[in-house]
Image (cartoon, helix red, strand yellow):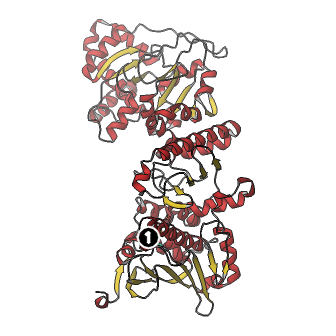
Amino acid sequence: MTETIEKETFSFQTEVGQLLEIVAGSLYSNREVFLRELVSNASDACDKLRYAALTDSSLAPAQDLAITLEIDAKAKTLSVSDNGVGMNHADLLETLGTIAKSGTSAFIEALKSEQKDAPGLIGQFGVGFYSAFMVASQVDVVTRKAGETEAWLWSSDGKGSFTIEPAQREASGTTVILHLKKDAKEFAEEARIRHIIKTYSEHISFPVKLGDETLNAAEALWTRPAKDITDEQYNEFYRYSAHAFDAPWHVMHNKVEGALNHTSLLFVPTVRPFDLFDAERKSHVKLYVNRVFISETTTDLVPAYLRFLRGVVDSQDLSLNVSREMLQTDPKLAKIKTQVTKKVLSELKKKAAKAPDEYAKFWDNFGAVLKEGLVEDPSMRDRILEVCRFTSTGADALTSLAGYAERMKEGQEAIFYIAGENAAKLAQSPHIEGFKAKGVEVLLLSDHVDEFWLQHITEFDGKPLKSITRGAADLDQIKADEAKSEEKTEEADLSALIAAIKVELGETVKDVRPSKRLTDSPVCLIADEGDMDVNLERLLKRHGQLEHSMPRVLELNPTHAIITTLAERAKAESAGADDLLKDAAHLLLDQARIVEGESPTDPSAFARRLGVVMARAFGT
Ligand SMILES: Nc1ncnc2c1ncn2[C@@H]1O[C@H](COP(=O)(O)OP(=O)(O)OP(=O)(O)O)[C@@H](O)[C@H]1O
């Protein structure tokens, strides 16, 4: 077969082409990371072969797994070889020419607009192999897949296309040959290469060799005692294993000895990883069994709500002789998962108590993800709730639920919250006015996931969690702050007005009531007790999971000038024929809708009514 195949030319997937243009066209201060990426790929390939050989001994490499660097100073090439798993024709087509990651286009847009920070973004995205084009004008890859006899040469100048042709390679593995750009000759210097490997790849599990010399410790970092590891070593290992550029926000290195031994070295990133909100919700903690890499993306090791974690978990007590799939259903693995999860949550709790400002940064990045656990993992619910933080009208900094509970007012029985798109907007919502006036704190919940965990958790420490946009709000029981002594404003009798509005609005509202929660605004809409809360309904509608809205309760502020004037007008005998009163009923409803960011029920009728009222006001 192979004899008949000549050199074939393929175009890069559009996104790869765009990415390469950005990668190759810019000069980065730390472009030496290309070597870290290639060594990391080579190490992954060795890991994969070691794993494959467990179940198929014919694949076992003839020589110890290793990564070999070669410099040809004359030809200005640098090559990175491994005797790992290698690639065949189909693999090459699939992996070195496409980007299989979701959200790639969005990422490229971001990259285009933020050229300056390209390395940081690339780190979050992990362009890996393609970073070779930062330093090389041409890249050749000679590779042979373990268990196969054919070898292939992949070659590209990074300008839109690549070629694949048959080649020769003695054993399985991959050699990546970089033809260095003129301005990248430094990477053909031994001293420079030695230094880069020391910096970035010191503690990967396989030896990295340059000639006869092994450049790294080739000892998995997590197996060493924590006291012997410096912060810088942890940082580099994090950057290497997570393809990251930031320093970790927090490092957790734990050895658990007992019935089930395992070691974990986990990192919380400082910067939010690019794929955090991908639908796949992939885990990025690598599972090792006695230093043999098993898999990376399993949620059987770390729950999806901790998917921001990077690092490794290694246990010698899991069986190496079973398949990856069987291992994933091993009850021992489930135990490790529970222990790791508890440990991470307890570390977060400590951080939150010790360094609340730093914790706020973590929360800003990952709080929304962590809160998914409140829905998904009832067994950890209390522990997760302890480390949750919220924006609140009563505190400048984020608050815990316990903190809120401590500040509750005399007579206040519930923890109040309002949920919506944006905390700053929520703080301006009319629903909050009465609470503010009394100094009663309201939590401002603006993550989508909030609506969902609130379906499961209805109280904290015996205090119900209550939405201020649903059901009646009786603030009379709550004692106001002294400073905010209650200036009782005269409340109008609204019964005639309410009756008139009900007649006019009919079924578009569920009810019309005097409000206890408004001080400045004339009206607001709320969900009736027992109905779906306003924000949840909005979310479901937007995601096509709900077609029709429920009619809402329209609340009127009995102390507001517009309402008191209308109340007087409604008392008149001729009120039934009062067109202005009728228009006002619709306008009040639309006003309440607009304040919540919704459209008037009937925009053209709204415009007409507004015109009529303005004409009256201006006396035209
Ligand atoms: N030395 C190698 N041996 C075998 N396969 C390789 C090698 N280098 C790259 N590959 C294949 O090419 C794919 C793409 O590599 P690339 O570095 O672009 O991304 P990645 O390593 O999958 O992702 P990330 O960089 O985010 O970890 C790899 O997943 C692997 O399948």
Q: Nearer the viewer, residue 236 or 245?
A: 236
Q: Nearer the viewer, residue 486 or 65?
A: 65
Location of residue 395 in the rendering, given as x and y in whole percent from the top left corner = 63, 30
Examine the rendering and report whether any part of residue 173 can be seen.
Answer: yes
Residue labelled 1 has its Cβ within 8 Å of some atom of ligand 1: no
Please tell me which residue is depicted at 55% across the width and 69% down the height of the picture. 40
Location of residue 581 in the rendering, given as x and y in whole percent from the top left corner = 32, 18
Please tell me which residue is depicted at 45% across the width and 17% down the height of the picture. 557
Residue that carries the numbered disc 1 in the rendered image = 57
**Quadrant including the C terminus:** top left
Residue type at mark 1 is: Ser
Please tell me which residue is depicted at 34% across the width and 37% down the height of the picture. 540
Location of residue 288 in the rendering, given as x and y in whole percent from the top left corner = 53, 57
Q: Secondary structure at mark 1?
A: helix
Examine the rendering and report whether any part of residue 620 can be seen.
Answer: no
Q: Nearer the viewer, residue 207 or 92?
A: 207
In the image, taking residue 544 as reference, residue 375 lies left or right, namely right
